[in-house]
Amino acid sequence: MSILNTVSYTWTTYRKLGNFPINSEHNANILPNGVIVYIGGIEQVFYGATFTLVNMHKIKLFNTNTLEWSRKNATGVEIDLRLYFSSVLSEL
């Protein structure tokens, strides 16, 4: 993951993925608290494996303040697997 510091205009590369698969074609939104929410797309479970669609209920989070990954499971209506989509962040 490449991170742009918008104060100093410098790039850094964060390589630690932990036990999180490599994702692409996902959607990401950053919350006001600095957490990036990754939804959907495809993942590669381990190097050399084929790619599979990500369950939309399995949300991956990256905290830009602590540089740590976590997971959350969404509840509610089942949403079809997808990639190349958009989302909008809004407050309720």
Image (spheres, rainbow, N blue to C red):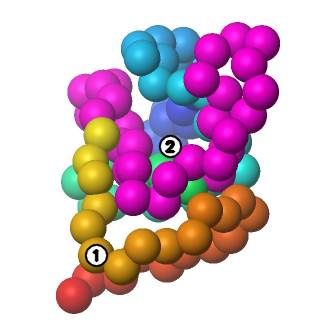
Report which residue position mark 2 lands on: 6
The three-letter code of the residue at mark 1 reads Gly
- 65 vs 16, left or right, is left
Q: Position of residue 52 (x, y in %)?
A: 68, 40
Residue 42 visible within the image: yes
For image coordinates 47% across by 18% down, the residue present is: 17
Q: Quadrant of the N terminus?
A: top right
Task: Report the span colored magenta.
Answer: 41-70
Callout 1 environment at 10 Å: few (<14), some (14 to 19), or many (20+)? Answer: few
Give the x, y percent position of residue 29: 47, 60
Q: Is residue 75 left or right of residue 28?
A: left
Instruction: Indicate left or right for 27 with 66 as reference.
Output: right
Residue at the image position 29 percent from the left and 34 percent from the top? 70
Q: Quadrant of residue 49?
A: top right
Q: Let me know if residue 63 appears in the view.
A: no
Label 2: few (<14), some (14–19) or many (≥20) C-alpha neighbours in 10 Å: few
The quarter of the image holding the C terminus is bottom left
Q: CA distance from mark 1 to mark 2?
A: 36 Å
Q: Identify the residue under disc 1.
A: 76
At a point 49% along the width and 73% down the height, the residue shown is 79
User: Which amino acid type corresponds to the residue marked 2 in the rendered image?
Assistant: Thr
Front-most of residues 26 and 57: 57
Q: Nearer the viewer, mark 1 or mark 2?
A: 1
